[in-house]
Image: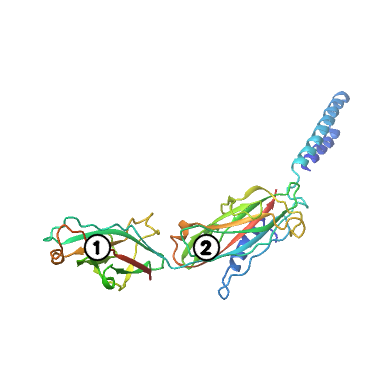
């Protein structure tokens, strides 16, 4: 074409290649091959699918040492929940190591229940109470990277509580242990 | 050609001028000397300014295939797709340069899924079967490449002569919104 230089042809090629990339019935048009000339242009379509993913990180063990039975025990920690869905939504399901996954600690012979709460905001000392094995849905994350390495350093709060009533059932000078498991899933 | 024409014009002007015989001889001698020098200079300039795209300085890129990463299961590691392609250069040195552009803003190497985007890297190697090469910048030629192809479609000689590598970095994958991404990478090659 009169008046077109190499860059014009390059731009035209790119425009045509862009048009070729339009999805047709879900499949991109195939690669284009260059021809022999003073310049040669080819193109490839590139496709990738990123699946829904979540990641829970930043968890710390919870330890109540020499807890006064007259004072309720509370441990709140900031954790990172990352979700890559378009809404950054997720749900969380907790389970304990007690009978039927109950939230209980044990010293072998005796058990004591504890409660678990969750907040989709970090820095909280109270949240929504969780029931073992039941998902808390409709949560949103502000995390922008999978382990909060960049952006917000945390995105949720995990709160574990031992009430005074339950503390007062515990045997003194005895260690109670248990494991709390948390499962997050994308929404 | 302009350099050659100028002294010829000067000669005509000299012959038309009204000068004494002695001074005319001296002028003619100087003019002849000038003509010789100018002619030699013109030859030199002509040699140096020979069009860089002579008839034989042709290139061809081919055997390209689409890049499909499919569903990327592990977002914490780089996803790499490399392909060996045919890059032919008919220049005296078989040299070429390559310029890549994507379908992102200003030719950026990005894939898109609706309003979401996913950046990728493009690397180039003048050797086949490579999984790493020289990083390309969108719209910036990578020069100094040399092809081993002896035939424009690589039907004879080496079956391929370069590697195109596309990389989805884990940092980009782990911060991308879930979805199906697509885009087009365009490659322009020129002889050197």
Residue furthest bottom in the image? A25
Based on the displayed image, in which of its 4 quarters is residue A77 positioned? bottom left
Which mark identifies residue B53?
A: none
Q: Are marks 2 and 1 on the same chain?
A: no
Against A95, is B139 above or below? above
Q: Nearer the viewer, mark 2 or mark 1?
A: 1
Closer to us: B88 or B50: B88
Q: Secondary structure at mark 1?
A: strand
Q: Which is more toward the observer, B34 or A93? A: A93
Q: Quadrant location of residue B34?
A: top right
Report the quarter where the C terminus of chain A lies. bottom left
Q: Chain of mark 1?
A: A
Q: Residue at x 70, y 51 (%)?
A: B147
- The chain carrying label 2 is B
Determine if residue B108 is in view.
no
**Would residue A122 appear left or right of A23 to someone viewing this image?**
left
The x, y position of residue A120, in whole percent, is 29, 65
Task: Tell me the distance, in whole angstroms, between the alpha carbons under discs 2 and 1.
Answer: 40 Å
Q: Badge 1 local density, few (<14 within 10 Å), some, or many (20+)?
A: many
Residue tagged by mark 1?
A: A159
Tell me the element at label 2: strand
Look at the picture and state if B1 lies above or below A64. above
User: How many neighbours does mark 2 have within 10 angstroms: few (below 14), some (14-19), or many (20 or more)?
Assistant: many
Q: Is residue A74 visible?
A: yes
Image x and y of residue B159, in percent: 72, 58
Q: Describe residue A6's horizontal placement relative to residue A121 as left or right.
A: right
Quickly name the residue at label 2. B111
Nearer to me, A8 or B80: B80
Q: Quadrant of the N terminus of chain A?
A: bottom right
The residue lying furthest to the front in this view is: A109
Where residue B121 appears, as percent x and y from the top left, is 54, 55
Query: What percent of the width, then of the height, locates residue A48?
Result: 53, 65
């Amino acid at each position: 074409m009169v008046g077109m230089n190499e860059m014009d042809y390059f731009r035209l090629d790119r425009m045509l290649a862009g048009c070729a990339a339009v999805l047709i019935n879900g499949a991109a048009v195939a690669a284009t091959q260059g021809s022999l000339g003073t310049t040669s242009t080819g193109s490839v379509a590139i496709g990738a699918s990123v699946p829904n993913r979540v990641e829970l990180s930043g968890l710390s063990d919870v330890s109540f040492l020499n807890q006064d039975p007259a004072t309720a025990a509370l441990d709140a920690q900031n954790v990172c929940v990352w979700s890559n869905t378009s809404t950054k939504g997720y749900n969380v399901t907790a389970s304990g190591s007690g009978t039927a996954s109950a939230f209980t600690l044990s010293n072998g012979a005796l058990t004591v229940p504890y409660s678990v709460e969750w907040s989709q905001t970090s820095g909280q000392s109270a949240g929504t109470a969780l029931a073992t094995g039941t998902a808390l849905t409709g949560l949103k994350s502000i995390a922008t990277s999978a382990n909060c390495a960049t952006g917000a350093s945390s995105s949720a709060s995990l709160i574990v509580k031992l009430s005074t009533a339950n503390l007062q059932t515990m045997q003194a000078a005895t260690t109670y242990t248990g494991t709390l498991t948390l499962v997050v899933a994308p929404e | 050609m302009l350099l050659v024409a100028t002294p010829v014009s000067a000669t005509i002007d000299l012959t038309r001028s009204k000068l004494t015989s002695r001074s005319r001889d001296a002028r003619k001698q100087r003019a002849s000397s000038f003509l010789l020098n100018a002619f030699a200079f013109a030859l030199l300039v002509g040699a140096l300014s020979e069009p860089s795209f002579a008839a034989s300085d042709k290139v061809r890129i081919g055997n390209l295939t689409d890049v499909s990463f499919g569903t990327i299961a592990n977002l914490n590691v780089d996803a790499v797709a490399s392909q060996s392609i045919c890059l032919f250069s008919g220049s005296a040195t078989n040299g070429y340069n390559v310029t890549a552009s994507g379908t992102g803003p200003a030719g950026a190497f990005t894939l898109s899924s609706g309003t979401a985007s996913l950046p990728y890297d493009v690397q180039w190697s003048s050797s086949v079967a490579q999984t790493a090469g020289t990083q390309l910048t969108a719209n910036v030629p990578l020069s100094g490449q040399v092809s081993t192809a002896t035939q424009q479609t690589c039907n004879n000689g080496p079956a391929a002569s370069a590697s195109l590598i596309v990389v989805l970095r884990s940092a980009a994958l782990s911060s991308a919104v879930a979805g199906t991404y697509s885009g087009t990478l365009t490659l322009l090659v020129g002889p050197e």
